[in-house]
Image (tube, rainbow, N blue to C red):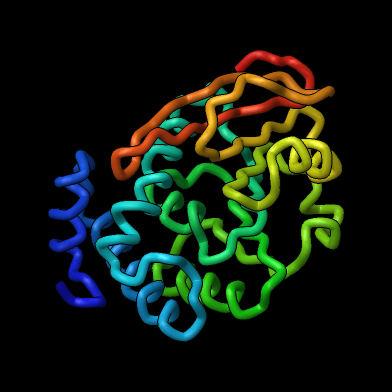
């Protein structure tokens, strides 16, 4: 297979994983995968080196996350993706779910530049890259309805530190390999959702400030 996949190759691979892509979804993912493989040679953005490995082990998270977010009763107006790195899960997520404004927050400049290139090539709507540390975000970015975190920091520490970035009824979605139903003071656990990737179980956990209903 080519290092820069064609849309039809991506669609066939995804179908083998149980996901039927539209033509536009396959095209956008092929653009992202091609860019990621190319930049990964120089920057070591992700562990897998081929687009098939990246699709099989990383991109799947994004379409499962999109399915979950579509089920929320209220859709976030502003989402922060903290420690976005190479744009996972956020950039492929926006291929499947485009509600509100989505901000990819990453302090490392080279990674932020990569994401800016990917977002521009893919023409993703209302998707922005912010090269900054979480604590340096401007006040306008500290009213997030949803914060997404994948391995940004241990989840208990994350919940404690992101409160200043959340709207009064904000939510935090944690992606992890554990299914704990524990929480921390000031949050309620709204749901735990299991999903499979590469033969392993992964979990989404959605926390909310306080205990309102979704």
Q: How many marks?
A: 0
Frontmost residue, 120 versus 64: 64
Frontmost residue, 124 versus 91: 91
Q: Give me the residue at 43% from left, 27% from top.
A: 194
Frontmost residue, 9 versus 196: 196
Q: Give me the residue at 68% from left, 32% from top.
A: 171
Q: Residue 55, position in %: x, y?
A: 31, 56
Does residue 65 sit above or below 34 in this rendering? above
Residue positioned most to the bottom: 42
Q: Give me the residue at 52% from left, 25% from top.
A: 72
Q: Give me the residue at 69% from left, 43% from top.
A: 154
Q: Residue 207, position in %: x, y?
A: 67, 27
Q: Residue 105, position in %: x, y?
A: 67, 60
- Is residue 9 shown left or right of residue 187? left
User: Which image quarter holds the C terminus?
Assistant: top right
Frontmost residue, 149 versus 141: 149
Q: Residue 117, position in %: x, y?
A: 49, 77
User: Which image quarter holds the N terminus?
Assistant: bottom left
- Is residue 84 shown left or right of residue 154? left
Q: Quadrant of residue 158?
A: top right
Does residue 211 sit above or below 141 in this rendering? above
Does residue 210 sit above or below 10 in this rendering? above
């Amino acid at each position: 297979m080519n290092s820069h996949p064609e849309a039809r190759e991506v669609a066939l691979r995804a179908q083998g994983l149980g996901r039927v892509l539209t033509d536009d979804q396959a095209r956008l993912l092929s653009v992202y995968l091609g860019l990621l493989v190319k930049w990964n040679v120089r920057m070591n953005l992700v562990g897998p080196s081929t687009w098939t490995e990246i699709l099989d082990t990383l991109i799947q998270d994004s379409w499962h996350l999109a399915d979950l977010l579509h089920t929320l009763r209220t859709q976030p107006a502003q989402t922060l993706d903290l420690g976005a790195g190479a744009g996972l899960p956020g950039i492929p997520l926006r291929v499947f779910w485009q509600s509100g404004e989505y901000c990819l927050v990453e302090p490392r400049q080279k990674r932020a530049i990569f994401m800016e290139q990917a977002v521009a090539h893919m023409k993703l709507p209302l998707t922005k890259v912010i090269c900054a540390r979480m604590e340096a975000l401007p006040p306008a970015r500290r009213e997030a309805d949803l914060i997404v975190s994948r391995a940004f920091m241990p989840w208990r520490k994350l919940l404690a530190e992101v409160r200043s970035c959340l709207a009064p009824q904000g939510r935090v979605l944690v992606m992890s390999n554990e299914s704990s139903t524990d929480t921390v003071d000031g949050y309620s656990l709204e749901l735990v959702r299991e999903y499979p990737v590469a033969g392993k179980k992964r979990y989404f956990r959605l926390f909310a400030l306080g205990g309102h209903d979704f």
